[in-house]
């Protein structure tokens, strides 16, 4: 805007000189007219050429990141023209918080390239846009400014943070032996049930070499799932029960200007019950999937999210991808979510219920599920520390009094220490017909 004003001022002086030259016939006014006209033309040509012949490329190392970890992005600006660029302003339109990719490049010579790398500490989960990029430049007098937009955009998914959980209650469940021992799986487990002829797509590490040599054709082993109960994580995302602590604007501004390495000492979560609950759910899911347990997820946020239980590494990616975009915008009470979605769960399934709600209805539902054969573990996020109502302590005492594992997660707690300090699981009898090892 300021450059446009300057150009209009010069143009106005030029018109005044033209009128004065025509009225008075003085050569000075003619010379001033020629000077101002040539200045406007040369400045416009300079500013226009400053954004031409530039090629910008950006390379993101990965399309997935995680809260508390660094995202690296490499930029390259090449001048393909024979004219130097005195200065070029690179403005990045990414909406990833604290992604400082904008630059001011000075004296980019002809046929030269400028490369820079941006490292951003991811502090907020979600799906974010990378780009577009706008290149702008002006003439030395600042009379004109030209912009050139590179509309190519990318995307990045920032997963919620996970903390290494050392131990977590996983009660032994009642497992129907007959069905469990006849469930085939593509995963390699400790339970090999037989062999069959090789089929296209089978992994080579499944080949049973003694049978292959004996029959003179490829024979592979068949496996069945381990007789372990599934784990289902129920996350309360009802809008009315979640709270957050307002962040001071001055503190936020100071954090934005600090370098990324100043924030890597410890994990900082947003002070909200939603972030603490999501991080707890992601950490528990990672704990069980690393131990080859089948994990499912249920959450009612913007919409109903249900991920069927599975046990491979891809399952962890599905859970984290869903949690990344999950928001506290649900309308259904957590007690109803537990009642509706628990009907499909088999007897002996471990249910991890995570909620900041202080309503007794969902606790009563959890205790009822525990009496029907499900094994319930509860994580209560203390809403009082985030500006919400008190009462989580009483719910914890009630749950512990009934023998249900429960933990209280407060604002500022170390999630790794708290999640790893849950009470020991109850000893639950196992039917004689099932595998008697520890699940």
Image: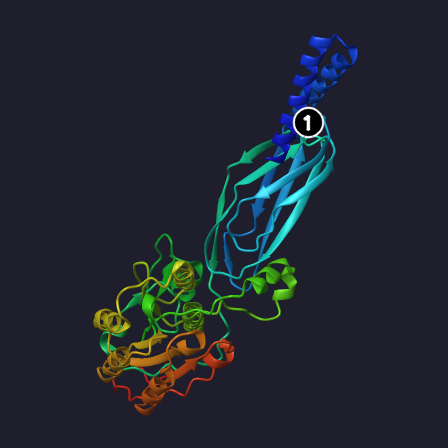
Relative image position of residue 15 (x, y in whole percent): 65, 17
Q: Few, some or many C-alpha atoms within 10 Å of disc 1 (few <14, some 14-19, many ≥20)?
A: some
Relative image position of residue 331 (x, y in whole percent): 27, 64
Q: Residue at x 52, y 41 (%)?
A: 132
Between 347 and 301, the one lying in front of the other is 301
Relative image position of residue 207 (x, y in whole percent): 41, 62
User: Can you say which quadrant of the picture contains the C terminus?
Assistant: bottom left
Residue most extreme to the front: 24
Of helix, strand and loop, which one carries label 1? loop
Q: Residue at x 69, y 40 (%)?
A: 105
Look at the image and tell me whether residue 110 can be seen. Answer: yes
Task: State the scheme by which the image is colored.
Answer: rainbow
**Residue denoted by label 1:** 81
Q: Quadrant of residue 359?
A: bottom left
| In the image: residue 119, left or right of residue 82 | left
Between 188 and 234, the one lying in front of the other is 234
Q: Quadrant of residue 55?
A: top right
| In the image: residue 413, left or right of residue 340 | right
Residue most extreme to the bottom: 401
Q: Quadrant of residue 357?
A: bottom left
User: Can you say which quadrant of the picture contains the N terminus?
Assistant: top right
| In the image: residue 428, left or right of residue 277 | left
Look at the image and tell me whether residue 193 can be seen. Answer: no
Q: How many marks?
A: 1
Q: Residue at x 61, y 55 (%)?
A: 119
Between 309 and 277, the one lying in front of the other is 277
| In the image: residue 244, left or right of residue 301 | right
Relative image position of residue 339 (x, y in whole percent): 22, 73
Residue 329, above or below 283: above
Q: Residue at x 52, y 77 (%)?
A: 414
């Amino acid at each position: 805007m300021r450059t446009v004003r300057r150009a209009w001022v010069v143009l106005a002086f030029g018109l005044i000189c033209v009128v004065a030259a025509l009225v008075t016939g003085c050569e000075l006014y003619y010379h001033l007219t020629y000077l101002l006209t040539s200045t406007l033309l040369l400045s416009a040509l300079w500013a226009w050429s400053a954004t031409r012949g530039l090629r910008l490329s950006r390379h993101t190392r990965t399309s997935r990141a995680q809260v508390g970890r660094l995202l690296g992005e490499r930029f390259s600006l090449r001048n393909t023209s024979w004219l130097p660029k005195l200065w070029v302003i690179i403005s990045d339109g990414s909406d990833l918080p604290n992604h400082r990719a904008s630059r001011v490049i000075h004296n980019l010579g002809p046929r030269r390239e400028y490369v820079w790398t941006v490292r951003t500490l991811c502090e907020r989960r979600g799906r974010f846009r990378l780009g577009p990029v706008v290149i702008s430049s002006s003439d030395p007098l600042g009379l004109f400014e030209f912009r050139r937009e590179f509309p190519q955009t990318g995307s990045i998914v920032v997963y919620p943070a996970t903390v290494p959980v050392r131990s977590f209650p996983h009660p032994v469940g009642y497992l129907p032996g007959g069905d469990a021992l006849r469930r085939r799986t593509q995963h390699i487990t400790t339970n090999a049930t037989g062999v069959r002829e090789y089929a296209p797509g089978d992994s080579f590490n499944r080949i049973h070499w003694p049978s292959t040599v004996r029959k003179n054709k490829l024979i592979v082993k068949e496996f069945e799932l381990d007789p372990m109960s599934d784990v289902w994580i129920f996350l309360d995302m009802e809008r009315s029960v979640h709270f957050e602590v307002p962040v001071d604007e001055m503190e936020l501004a100071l954090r934005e200007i600090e370098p990324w390495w100043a924030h890597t000492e410890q994990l900082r979560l947003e002070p909200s019950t939603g972030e603490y609950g999501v991080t707890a759910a992601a950490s528990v899911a990672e704990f069980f999937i690393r131990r080859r347990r089948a994990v499912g997820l249920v959450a009612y946020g913007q919409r109903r999210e249900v991920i069927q239980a599975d046990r491979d590494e891809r399952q962890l990616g599905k859970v984290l991808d869903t949690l990344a975009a999950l928001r506290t915008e649900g309308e259904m009470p957590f007690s109803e979510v537990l009642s509706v979605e628990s009907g499909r769960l088999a007897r002996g399934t471990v249910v991890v219920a995570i909620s900041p709600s202080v309503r007794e209805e969902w606790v009563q539902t959890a205790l009822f599920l525990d009496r029907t054969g499900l094994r319930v573990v509860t994580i209560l996020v203390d809403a009082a520390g985030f500006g919400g109502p008190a009462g989580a302590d009483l719910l914890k005492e009630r749950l512990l009094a009934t023998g249900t594992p429960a933990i209280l997660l407060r604002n500022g707690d170390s999630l790794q220490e708290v999640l790893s300090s849950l009470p020991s699981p109850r000893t639950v009898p196992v039917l004689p017909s099932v595998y008697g090892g520890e699940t």
